[in-house]
Amino acid sequence: MHLFLLLILQATAAIGQIDPAHCRYPLGMEDGRIKDDALKASSQWHETTGPQYARLNREEGHGAWCPAAQPSVSQYLEVDLGRLTFLTVIGTQGRYIRNSGNEFAREYRVNYSRDGKLWKSWRNRQGNEVNAYNSVIKDLRPPIVTRYVRLLPVTRLSTTICMRVELYGCSWDDGLISYSAPEGQRMQPPGYPIANLNDSTYDGVHERGKLFGGLGQLTDGVIGQDDFTRTHEYSVWPGYDYLGWKNDSLEHVEMEFVFDRQRNFTSMKVHSNNMFSRDVKIFSSVSCWFKPHFVWEAEPVEFRTVLDDRNPSARYVTVDLNHRTAKSLRCRFYFADVWMMFSEISFQSGNKHTHVQTKVQNTSVTPDDGKTPILIGCLVTIILLLVIIIFLILWCQYVCKVLEKTLIKQALVFPTACGGGYAEPDITQCTPHQCFHSNAPHYAETDIVRLQGVTGSNMYAVPALTVDSLTRKDISAAEFPRQQLIFREKLGEGQFGEVHLCEAEGLPEFLGEGSPLPDRDGHSVLVAVKQLRADATSQARNDFLKEIKIMSRLNDPNIIRLLCVCVSSDPLCMVTEYMENGDLNMFLSQREIESTLTHANNIPSVSLSDLLHMAVQISSGMKYLASLNFVHRDLATRNCLLDRRLTIKIADFGMSRNLYSSDYYRIQGRAVLPIRWMAWESILLGKFTTASDVWAFGVTLWEIFTLCKEQPYSLLSDEQVIENTGEFFRNQGRQIFLYAPPLCPPSLFELMMRCWSRDIPDRPTFEGLYQALKPHVNQS
Ligand code: ADE
């Protein structure tokens, strides 16, 4: 967080063009950003008074740096700031060691070096080498551009002196390490005070009318005023802020700029006076040459200014440097009038903005090579990206939720026609569009044949079979004399009908030779008779006939078999084989897994092998349905029947028995959906396919291996199951899967999990399931 604030601070500084008055940030002596190895001293009194203890307000060691010898200007504390720094303030303290010491330096000098080799003495604005201060916080006027600083304590008394220090300033990102120029001149117009336009803070060499190897007023951060005779500093002379030249002795002003490293220059800004009433104007043109390595390039960049005789304001003139690369620049400025005066020069290189007048403040000693503006750009971009991403995520979540709710609503108001039964996937998949057309209550009327909608909620589906076209000749099952059906008991009941156990007299003879006979109870043949109520709607009646039509086409050892029908008169009946052991759910829920305990206590039990055999049979029946492109839509243990020999046959009872009503989710009293067995796409999109049957098969397996002792997702309410469906759809790892039943072999649970793959192609086929399950039977 601290770092982040520092970055923000730096960024703000760069944008806000901070001047030396604001560039007063502690550089890291006190808070340790300046490391011990950046501190050196000419000597130390004791190892506990080494330079590493010269930190303002810190009491480590013996509380300060104390040199070994009697202080003289030869003793120094050296700080390596790690990079070029615009140093504006020095703070010093003595040694107090918890109030027991009072050694301090009343005075000290400041030396500095940009490269660690050439050392210079700091001078005040008057150009005097001042050797002593007596204040604790001292503003450096002028500030220094430096990397290395030496403080040299001075005392006239023969006492021990100690120092603790903080340095203040900001990073010097320009990278300009020296400029050369002709010496500034004096203006002595009659009737005006003399203006001395020299570079009085220049810290390089003055030789034969030339300045070289240093920095000075053009980089001190002070912009000259419109009237060049007025100054920002007190007790300085007129023209102090400007470096100025007259055209009588010079054809042009040539300056050379040397940088710390090669840079790609975009522009140069020259702050110039334009007081034309005193014969001063900005330059008329400038030519700059570039030295990338050792040789000057021949081709200069030339720039012509637009002269202004109306506005006498001093101003920055921006010179385009065309992205030329160089470590040194030589520029020739041409006069537009008698005088030319500059107060600041700055360079913009690469995507970095360097400005001699405005320094980027810095509270870190890590070199950044002027990357602050890049940093700002990155920070702003990152923040913007984050905001956009957060917005998109929230928006997506919102849209997904709304979409999901709409789809769920649509899927759930879906009438029973789409709610179950067998369907041909490619032709008669329920889609919201098909199912919710405003004038078509449900597409069953045109596309789907309802089969067990009478006694249950489910149906089989076949394409393009209309109600009107369905007649007796479409039904291939034979008409059985209803008086030969002798009622024994009621097996189940639904909204439009009942299922009875009946004795079918003469059925073997009726069905004829070669026809597989149902089991016999002694001499009589027991059958299940599904019968439509006399008061059933015409819709239910048609669905009943369609169910018969489809069932009469199915012929598989693991699918319940239609034996005959009674449709020539009411009530309509269909006769199927009778399954003595009832449905698989009831069967398993009343049993325990086989063990010595179940044997000893005669508890009804099943073996693991029985369970696997059941799984194989169901997969086989489903494989058959899938091969005919029939979609069941309600595969579950409650819809699998068992005969005496534990052969399983898939049937479809839907709501024919109120017993399992909690397995169906009812919406507004209309649709009933087995949501706990349904794939996400069936719930959300109303899409039923063989792949969604595979999903249901996975849940059926899970039921088998929990011995139907628990409803799937028993801890979730119906609403939570639907929410969980949304998670299956989003597939972000938040969906709740059914747990691995303890009885279930791991490889089998893996198979179940594959059935619940979010992506349809990742789910196994029934053929694959059958092949995978079959070998387990013999192994167990
Ligand atoms: N309940 C409904 N149909 C049945 C059948 N065919 N056998 C046994 N019980 C049933």
Image: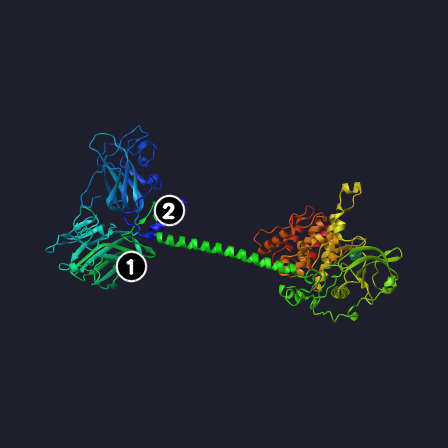
Q: In the figure, residue 291 lies in which quadrant?
A: bottom left
Badge 2, how many Cα within 10 Å: few under 14, some, many 20+? some
Q: CA distance from mark 2 to mark 1?
A: 28 Å
The kind of residue tagged 1 is Ser
Q: Is residue 772 left or right of residue 273?
A: right
Disc 2, disc 1: CB below 8 Å? no
Q: Nearer the viewer, residue 320 or 189?
A: 189
Percent coordinates x, y for residue 430 in the rendering? 65, 64
Under circle 2, the secondary element is: helix
First in sequence: mark 2 vs mark 1: 2
Determine if the C-beta at disc 1 is less than 8 A from ligand 1: no
Residue lying at the far right of the rendered structure = 523
Under circle 1, the secondary element is: strand
Q: Is residue 4 left or right of residue 174?
A: right
Numbered mark located on residue 267 in the image: 1
Can residue 512 be seen by looking at this rendering?
no
The kind of residue tagged 2 is Leu
Q: Nearer the viewer, residue 69 or 544?
A: 544
Determine if the C-beta at disc 2 is less than 8 A from ligand 1: no
Percent coordinates x, y for residue 391 in the rendering? 48, 55
**Badge 2 is on which residue?**
6
Residue lying at the far left of the rendered structure = 190
